[in-house]
Amino acid sequence: MGGCVFLGMMAWYFGKPPNVRLYETKSEGQLTVAIAPYVDMTLDAQSGVAIKEGNPLQAELFRGEVYFDIKKDAKNALEVKVGNAMIRDFGTRFSIKKYDNGSNHIAVADGYIKIHVTSGVFQINAFEQADFDDKSISQHRLVIERDIAPWRQLPK
């Protein structure tokens, strides 16, 4: 009887496992999906991302490139993990590309994001891009909108 009570308490303590959805594209195309009522995501070919339910919604980019479109009125909508770097969104549109060599690239079309890396927290604003890894950012510079995720098929 004591064992049943113990197992019941452990089940209550740990709760149900988080709801994680995996999205992946092959070489033949892109995938656009609403991952929440306030967040749309487009994956480029040969890309993979995991989405974990929560507040905020949590994403982890495993490979390739992703574009997020978050509605402006969404608060604490999304966090994206890329390697050990954490990106926090503030009602914006942005793309992230993960390279095989451990470096990454981010470009912001609207709003701003904050990148948390070992050397500190860096803000990237609309029409800016930067390269980053787990430790720091580099090549922080201006960009024009058509160069932000140019692979993405724009609505006609």
Image (spheres, rainbow, N blue to C red):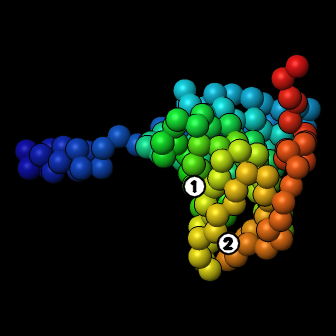
Q: Give the image quarter of residue 25.
A: top right
Q: Nearer the viewer, residue 119 or 15?
A: 119
> Residue farthest to the top?
156
* On-image quarter of the N terminus: top left
At horizontal 24% and vertical 50% (from top left) the residue drawn is 13
Q: Give the image quarter of residue 29.
A: top right
Identify which amino acid the numbered label 1 is placed on. Answer: Arg
Q: Nearer the viewer, residue 22 or 110?
A: 110
Q: Which residue is mark 1?
A: 88
Is residue 88 shown to the viewer in this render?
Answer: yes
At horizontal 75% and vertical 35% (from top left) the residue drawn is 42
Would residue 79 be found to the left or right of residue 128 on screen?
Answer: left
Q: Helix or strand or loop: what does disc 2 sit on?
A: loop
At horizontal 75% and vertical 68% (from top left) the residue drawn is 132
Q: Nearer the viewer, residue 29 or 140?
A: 140
Q: Which mark is residue 4?
A: none
Tag nearer the camera, 2 or 1 = 1
Instruction: From the top left corner, tell me how far across and down residue 6 is, in percent.
Output: 15, 51
Circle nearer the N terminus (2, 1): 1
> Residue farthest to the bottom?
119
Identify which amino acid the numbered label 2 is placed on. Answer: Asp
Q: Which residue is mark 2?
A: 134
Q: Residues within 10 Å of mark 1 (few under 14, many from 20)?
A: some
Instruction: From the top left corner, tell me how far across and down residue 87 is, in percent.
Output: 61, 58
At horizontal 84% and vertical 60% (from top left) the residue drawn is 142
Is residue 81 shown to the viewer in this render?
Answer: no
Q: Residues within 10 Å of mark 2 (few under 14, many from 20)?
A: some
Above-or-below relation of 87 to 20: below
Q: Helix or strand or loop: what does disc 1 sit on?
A: strand
